[in-house]
Amino acid sequence: MSLTYAIATPSYAGDVERCRLLCASVDRFVSGHVAHYLLVEDRDVPLFRDLETPRRRVIAESDLLPSWLRSRPDPLSLGRRRVWTGARALLKGIPPLRGWHAQQLRKFALPLHSTEDVVLFADSDMLFLRPFELGSLVTDEGIRLYRKPAGITPDMPEHRIWCDNASALLGLPPPTLPGPDYINNMVSWRRDNVRALVAQLERASGRDWVRAIASRRAFSEYMIYGYFVEQVLGLGPSGHWADERELCKVYWGGKAGAIDSLRSFEEVMEPWQVAVGVQSFIGEPVEKIRALFETQ
């Protein structure tokens, strides 16, 4: 049976121009997908609507997450930031969440609503720079899963918490470190595995999956999925094969100006890489990124 593929991009108002550039790169370089979903907060939908095409659809958060989890201005930041909370959320034991929490929950929710067999997540601050066909994720062993052996070590406190919470959510014993890292750009999930994962979370917690995950606050969607397919299902039975190569060259940190010396992103990409991600929080103006994209 042939598989169908979708691309999913959680985004927000502050990244709309970066998302616009990502969409242009998808249209230029990417093939093999049925749909490209932009997952955004309800109030941001009008900002993204002009990016829709016959294959690209903007999905409002209210179509994915329960009505009791909605964003509102954060009074502690004088309304400059958003916080996902409310009386009903607090009564359910959900601490106030930030935008990155909501984006992770949208990722889990999408395969519960969409029909494509495989979802490839592409963040809005990355862009494709070489031809990429989604069918290339498949081998006889299944769908590619990013997995870096011993990528998480005991001296990574934030990651340790994510690992601990992923194990607890799935009813697994505490993890031993060093352990595998599943966090990266261009991570692909199988829809049937997400559905099985959600069922496992609800059995283990006795609550709906959103409450189960969000009540811990410190969580990583990629660690939860990775632990599930490898330690609960088994990598082979889950329909995945492991690959530690990074398909996207990412600038995670550093100071603004990190790309100033580049004449082309080709200077920093490995032969197997097809995209570059420049994290929005390091301060690189989107105009610089667009100029480099246009050299391709």
Image (spheres, rainbow, N blue to C red):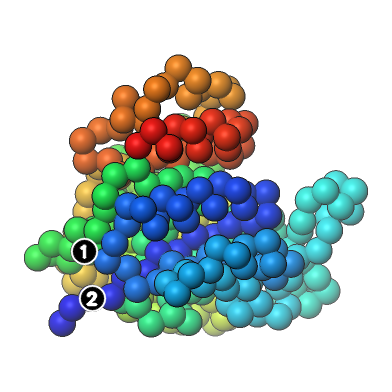
**Image height of 54 relative to 257, above or below:** below
CA gap, disc 1 and disc 2: 8 Å
Is 80 situated left or right of 215 in this image? right
Q: x, y percentage for residue 158?
A: 53, 42
Which amino acid is tagged 1?
A: Gly
Circles 1 and 2, Cβ within 8 Å, touching? The answer is yes
**Image height of 200 relative to 155, above or below:** below
Q: Residue at x 56, y 70 (%)?
A: 58
Is 57 situated left or right of 173 in this image? right
Q: Residue at x 24, y 58 (%)?
A: 133
Mark 1: give few (<14), some (14-19) or many (20+) Cα within 10 Å. Answer: some
Mark 2 lies on residue: 3
Is 176 situated left or right of 17 in this image? left
Quarter of the image with the N terminus in it? bottom left
**Is residue 162 visible in this depiction of the protein?**
no
Mark 1 lies on residue: 135
Q: Residue at x 83, y 55 (%)?
A: 74
**Is residue 159 visible in this depiction of the protein?**
yes
Most extreme residue toward the top is: 261
At mark 2, the secondary structure is loop
Quarter of the image with the C terminus in it? top left
From the viewer's side, name the closer residue of 176 and 192: 192
Q: x, y percentage for residue 289?
A: 50, 35
